[in-house]
Amino acid sequence: MDEFAAETKVEWREWGPEAFATAGRAGKPVLLALRASWCEECHEMDRTTYAEPRIAANVNDGFVPVRVDVDRHPRVRDRYNMGGFPSTVFLTPEGTVITGATFLGVDGFREILDAVRRTWDGSGLEAGSVPRALADADPPGGALSARVEGHMVEQLLAAYDDEFGGWGTDVKFPLPRTVEFALVRARDQATRTLEAVRTRLTDTHDGGFYRFARNRDWSDPSREKLTDENAALVRAFAHGYRYTGEEAYLDTAARGVDYLTTDLWTGEAFAASQGGADAYYRLAATERADADPPSVDDTVVAGHNALAADALLTVAAYTDDERARRYAERALDALRGLVREDGAVVHYRDGDETGTAGLLVAQARALVALTTAGQVLGDAGPARAVADYTLDTLRAESGAFRDGPTDGPGLCDRPLYPLDGGVRGRDRPDGRRGGSLRRGGRAPA
């Protein structure tokens, strides 16, 4: 159980079949709390809602409470996410969903507990339902044609915010992979978005990129820093430099490399994330020097290290940056240590604890990193084994890829076919449909 569980008064259980079996024997619903070590609202809910004695007593008496780290259990996250974290989800003992919400204060939590009890008492197992993405037994499929790319461009143009840059008119995520696509198909959109990220989501004192902005104008950032998202932005800025020759983009990528290789470096690999304690990040630079920075989650996640290695190799290929190359090679060493002989990638390692092997997100990201290593370093390592395992084990007859093994408690025994994960495994390492990484200079328009 994570260290923050001690702040609560809830008798948490680990995710697993025993928790659901207990719920079945006791005739109680399951309360599933999806949280992350970097999530400030998750910690706030621990300190307030779950620490309130009467709330905790109600949960312990009437439910089977289960706590899940979403970074370590992405299959659980993708089946039960209510749209953000924390996610509070009420399940039947069979794992179907009764209802759910994101952050809940004491009053809101008390209301939803009462509502769930009434629903459960009145309908029992019939109160639960299966999310639409899992209810359809037929995975997505269809012919791949040039029309797909044209449709993506149309979507890009329609969603772009002409006033502030970025896509969407509410919260603003940097969307680095969208930026890379736009650099080729809608360059002005890409460069304006890179400018917004560079000026509004960059921590100019400690380094790194904040996760997203809560407002349309890129103000009020949510300040957690995730390794995979920071790595993806380093690569996006490196590509921005390649396509435009703009030195500011290269400088931003270099500062991102500095952050990854210092604050997020464990000594052997890249850590998973750094928390987003807002009070710390609001301090002036002189005050930060005397304050403790937010904690770093030292879990070594295979996909995060793969993205970091890919990003650093991209920078090294464009600039001959020896430091970026050296840390990429060390991250690749750690990644290879998580690849089994059969090509299955172990999702994470934390001391002697390891995660599930063969998750699509880990397979796809590892394959991208290893093929980039083949281009830049001349050694793709176990790329062939990783590709073969992914094709042989996760690919359905339709050509779609499952997100991982089809076993486990709750709805984990139902296949999920994430479009993003399936496409990610088909990406070119340089973000284009052809060609290869090359050192220095600008790419053709």
Image (cartoon, rainbow, N blue to C red):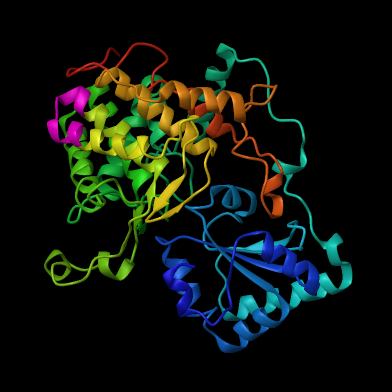
Q: Is residue 333 left or right of residue 353?
A: left
Where is 294 relative to 11, above or below?
A: above
322 drawn magenta = yes
Seen as rendered, the residue at the extreme front is: 341
Q: How far from the left and from the top, in percent, is residue 91?
A: 72, 62
Segment colored magenta: 316-326
User: Is residue 429 visible in the rendered structure shown here?
Assistant: yes
Q: Residue at x 25, y 29 (%)?
A: 313
Q: What kind of secondary structure does the magenta stretch mostly adopt?
A: helix
Seen as rendered, the residue at the extreme bottom is: 53
Q: Hey, which quadrant is residue 383 in on the image?
A: top left
Q: How far from the left and from the top, in percent, is residue 412?
A: 67, 48
Q: Residue at x 70, y 41 (%)?
A: 133
Q: Nearer the viewer, residue 6 or 87?
A: 6
Q: Nearer the viewer, residue 386 or 432?
A: 386
Q: Residue at x 54, y 27 (%)?
A: 389
372 drawn magenta = no
Q: Is residue 262 left or right of residue 38?
A: left
